[in-house]
Amino acid sequence: MNLRGLVWWRKWLWLGAMLAGTGGTLALMPTAPAARDTEAATSPLRAGSYLAGRFAQHTDDWMAAADFMGDALARDPDDANLLRRAFLLNLGDGRIPAALPLARRLTKQDDPNAPLAILLLIVDDMAAGRLDDADGRLGQLTTDGVTKYAGPLLAGWLALAKGHPKDAETALAPLEAVQGLHVLYALHRALIADVAKDQEAAAHWYDEATKDGSPTLRVVQAVSSFLQRTGHSDQAQALYTTFAKDNADGGLLDPSALAEEANIGSAPAVSSAQEGMAESLFDLASALHQEESDEMAVVYARLALILRPQFPIAQLLVGDILASRDHDAEAQVQYQEVAKDPALGWGARLRSSESLIRLDQTDQAASLLEAMAAEQPDRAEPLVRLADLYRANKKDAEAIKAYDRALARIPHLEERDWAILYGRAASYERIGPWEKSEQDLQAALNLSKDQAIVLNFLGYSWVDKGVNLEKAKTMIERAVALRPKDGYIIDSLGWALFRMGDRSGAVTQLERAIEMKPLDPTINDHLGDAYWAVGRKIEALFQWRRSLRESDDPDLSTTVRKKIEERRYVDPGIAGMPNGAL
């Protein structure tokens, strides 16, 4: 599952694109000057920690990198580059107590305008109630990159915290004129008015925030809460119903929880200036995440969590970023916290199951998915994921049963359900009967006719069995058109041409495929067959031997070994060549 597919984040793309154009995608970790690398070598202990930290950073192990850089900094406390690195690594890893003193040192040394250090100190001041200190630091923020947008948002909420709602409106004003920021501006105008108990202004700006017709979950939650609290529960229900319908494909939201949330008077999405500041930092984090600026996104999300530690949507974002970087154990901590949230807990638990699988804790993942399937007997997603898990582990009989159970929960198959049929077809193809696999593949294409992997799967299977060759070739050609750089699909086309007698055409396509997948044993085997058929016998043996080296499939290995031995025996021109020569 695509970890960037959360439906309530993707709607911030307009903001993410702007951040990308104004410094929002700058790498979190700056490149150290070459002179410093040379200097590091003059102190063996410092150099060892520094180089170990660089290596850990390169392998995306921020925890170890922060420890090593901290050790190097302790040995050379006046090195500004080490200070900056140690600060950023600790902040990115969520080690706020360690990052705070480094931020204070950083702003006093050669980089007084370090925006992330200043942001952290503003957030820390806000959390501790040091409003004047936070206000004084706001003027130090630069007006480029992400801070161009963070500054007005933080200033607005800080003004409200100091009891000046009119000043808060003025602080947000720079965002009003920026094209593409109307929803963000309107949302925070509404939230500020709501916290300030100005219902008339809040109603106006909440209405503005929903005018684009595709509000995010956070907008829906904020507006619905206001509608409920002001006696318009029917409008709140309609807003949730529309949102649930528009985002039904994701499988990450619990419709029953959304319905319950819409029917009861919920607390405000933001109930204080401190929570409002956290909201603004989360909005920026989610936009950065959409632009794949995850190093910056996780920092902004961590800042939001300082102000609002129990902030499920921000915790889910942090978990998502950690999981996408293969830090699944750390992601689990976030997912387990979010699992308690009524609206987001379902999605967090689904994501938790995926992280458990990547951690090789498949039994725990299966138990979690079975429990979710039992809790919601009308929902198919847990059973689909359970079936996929079984199929990935070649437990195809169990996979088929789980797919059957999932399909029984779907009264009317829709286009998106083609993947379930495809998965079951793959299991049937391995353990039989083939006819059921064929039926599922055809049914999947009836639901979604342009799925390249389904076209290729069915077309290749027909070619391999020597049936429906013309139709199979047409299907595979369509798959190639849809995915022209997929070596496996191009291999299927080459194999179809070979089986239909077009040997030279087969060589052309299979050579294309082998360029893309040079070590795939099946493609090497096919190319060997095609080379032999056109008289390129030495090259054929080379491809077969490569296939034999790379194969872990005993059936394929047996077939290829037999070809090699038979060809060497029957062809006088190659019979005398030693094995190593090929």
Image (cartoon, helix red, strand yellow):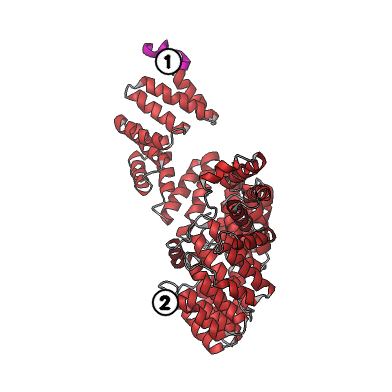
User: Is 106 in front, or is 87?
Assistant: 106
Residue at x 61% of width, y 70% of height: 122
**Mark 2 vs mark 1: which is more N-terminal?**
2
User: Is 44 in front, or is 431?
Assistant: 44
Disc 2 to disc 1, how far (Cα)? 77 Å
Q: Which SS type dominates the magenta stretch?
A: helix
**Residue 64 on image: x %, y %:** 65, 48
As helix, strand or loop, the secondary structure at mark 2 comes to loop
Please tell me in which quadrant of the rendered image residue 118 appears.
Answer: bottom right
User: For mark 2, what is the residue?
Assistant: 177
As helix, strand or loop, the secondary structure at mark 1 comes to helix
Q: Is residue 345 left or right of residue 216?
A: right
Q: Residues within 10 Å of mark 2 (few under 14, many from 20)?
A: few
User: For mark 1, what is the residue?
Assistant: 568
User: Is 413 in front, or is 271?
Assistant: 271
Question: What amino acid type should be assigned to the residue bearing mark 1?
Answer: Arg
Residue 258 seen in the current view: no
Instruction: Indicate which label's residue lies in the foreground, 2 or 1.
Output: 2
Span highlighted in magenta in the image: 570-582
Q: Is residue 222 left or right of residue 487?
A: right
Residue at x 32% of width, y 33% of height: 508
Q: Are marks 2 and 1 in contact (CB under 8 Å)?
A: no
Question: What amino acid type should be assigned to the residue bearing mark 2?
Answer: Ala
Q: Residues within 10 Å of mark 1 (few under 14, many from 20)?
A: some
**Residue 334 on image: x %, y %:** 65, 59
Is 576 part of what is drawn in magenta? yes
**Residue 96 on image: x %, y %:** 67, 61
Relative height, residue 453 to residue 115 (above, below)? above
**Residue 564 on image: x %, y %:** 45, 20
